[in-house]
Amino acid sequence: MFIGEYQHNLDEKGRLAIPAKFRSTLGKGAVVTKGLDNCLFLYTAPEWQKLAGKLATLPISKANTRAFGRLMLAGAMDVQIDRQGRIILPEYLRKYAGLKKKSIIAGLYNRLEIWDEDKWNKYKKGTEKQSNDIAEALAGLDV
């Protein structure tokens, strides 16, 4: 399970250190893709296979399912963790997420999200202000 928030620097070659506690879980292979809210999603290979399988079953006759499948699948890239615990993020994904030097890696149970630090802080601040309204809207989901 991925949880927590970690600040790491992206180097000039697009390498990003993965928090040490997650490296063994991701060491067997991982996939990074375009996420929602202009961040990146990083999945273990088994979690990615589950998600990709679900996306493959969505009806291609619906524009929204085609668009979401394209976002997630066409934007995906296999990544490997190097000996220093880093992954290389392709330029097109760094541009999509607006990643600069300072990045945040946020653990969200079955995935990690990779954010530009400024965007993360802005998003988090806005979400925290709305936390009561969000909780109220989720009340029917037994959360």
Image (tube, rainbow, N blue to C red):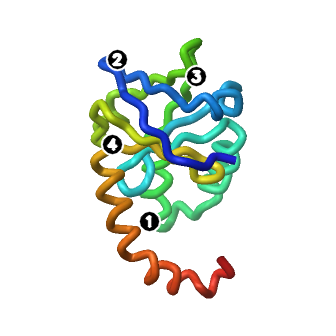
First-in-chain label (4 vs 3): 3
Give x and y (percent) for residue 15: 42, 22
Q: Disc 4 on helix, strand or loop?
A: strand
Secondary structure of the residue carrying numbered label 2:
loop
- Residue 29 appears in the rendering: no
Q: Amino acid at mark 3?
A: Gln
Q: Nearer the viewer, residue 17 or 39?
A: 17
Q: Which mark is residue 64?
A: 1
* Residue that carries the numbered disc 3 in the rendered image: 80
Marks 2 and 1, how far apart at CA: 34 Å
State the residue in front, 141 or 51.
Answer: 141
Q: Give the mark nearer the N terminus: 3 vs 2.
A: 2
Instruction: Kindly indicate whether the residue at mark 1 contacts the one at mark 3 (C-beta within 8 angstroms).
Output: no
CA–CA distance in space, label 3 to label 1: 31 Å
Taking the spot 44% from the left edge, 65% from the top edge, the residue there is 64
Of the image marks 2 and 1, the number of the one nearer the N terminus: 2
Mark closer to the observer (2, 1): 2
Query: Vertical placement of 104 versus 136: above or below?
Result: above
Q: Residues within 10 Å of mark 3 (few under 14, many from 20)?
A: some
For the residues labelled 2 and 4, the Cα–Cα distance comes to 16 Å
Secondary structure of the residue carrying tag 1 is helix
Q: Which mark is residue 13?
A: 2
Q: Does residue 36 appear anywhere in the picture?
A: yes
Q: How far is mark 4 from mark 3, CA to CA? A: 21 Å
